[in-house]
Amino acid sequence: MIIRLEQPKDYREVENLTREAFWNVYRPGCTEHYVLNQYRTNPDFIPELDFVMVESDGEHQSPGEIIGHVMFSKAEIMLDDGTPYPSWTFGPISIHPDYKRKGYGLKLLQYAIEKAKEMGIGLLQMEGNIEFYRHAGFDLASKLKIHYHAEPRDAEVPYFLALELIPNYWGNREGTYCPPKGYFVADENPEAFEAYEATFPAKEKAFQEGQLPQFCQSCGMPLTRIEDCGTNSDGSANFDYCQYCYKDGKYLQECTMDEMIEHCSQFVDEVNKQIPKPMTKEEYKQMMHGFFPMLKRWRR
């Protein structure tokens, strides 16, 4: 295998690789290929850390199919005193499905991390599976007192990881991390994403075991079956919204976020059947006020 910098001629092949690698893995379908497509012109993008892994024929090392890719981005952590502190992240990292679980992903990541060290990058944080990333030196970010924006401050978030590349770069600081805005580009530009996605061969979206929990992006209802989903204007399933919020490509109720929270609060007894510690109606509303601004419909 050869690892080299990505070149413009690679772009479409790498985006297709990324789509194949992530399809139905973390959610029905995926958006990682569009994130990559848009990120190359983002000022946070680091072209010196944009690598592809390419097949070679052994002795002559002639290039073949691209089977892996990883990109890095500038980021920041907001310190408790309100000061932004420079940090970095990476992803998507993609390995072709035919080459997964053969060590290629770790080899690509370790190579990229060494190059990041040479550039003076001091701290990486990202969301991922610690069972894989621990082999590259990552540990829970909470151990460095780095909190994740979408979780309670005192939570030990199992998927939020960090790796200090320069000893004592972070020191004894404490702060909160939110992924760079570029990672939310598909959510913020859904029509542009759908137009881009339509340029690829059609693939079926599906719920699968092992995916991240999916929630209606209007009311927060868990989505676990296709029957839970709303519908697009063509009658196909919409995996972002539930059947009670979205039908035929339209919201079923025009309301503000606060009105939606008030509506949902009447179902607190049903919610309490599914959690170990029951909430009062007011506690449930307070929880939704923290959660709903992260949903697509209400995100600003």
Image (tube, rainbow, N blue to C red):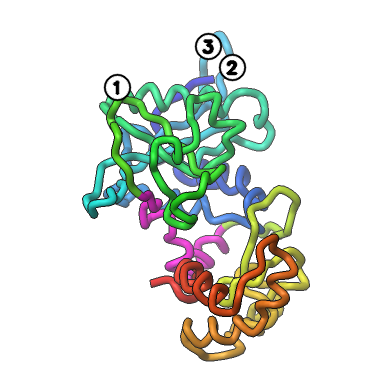
- 275 relative to 211, above or below: below
- Determine which residue is flagged by label 1: 118
* Cα gap from disc 1 to disc 3, whole angstroms: 29 Å
Which one is in front, 275 or 96?
275
Q: Which residue is mark 2?
A: 57
Query: Circle 3 sits on which residue?
Result: 60
Residue located at (45% from left, 40% from top): 142
Label 1 vs 3, first from the N-terminus: 3
**Disc assigned to residue 288:** none
Residue at disc 1, secondary structure: helix
- Disc 3 secondary structure class: loop
Residue 193: within the magenta? yes
Amino acid carrying mark 3 in the image? His
Front residue of 279/98: it is: 279
The residue drawn where x is 69% and y is 33% is: 98
Q: In the image as oriented, which residue stretches furthest toward the top?
A: 59
Magenta segment? 176-199
Q: Quadrant of the C terminus?
A: bottom left
Q: Residues within 10 Å of mark 2 (few under 14, many from 20)?
A: few
* Image quadrant in which the N terminus is located: top right
Q: Residue furthest bottom?
A: 254
Q: Position of residue 235 (x, y in %)?
A: 71, 79
Q: Nearer the viewer, residue 128 or 62?
A: 128
What's under tag 1, amino acid-wise? Answer: Glu
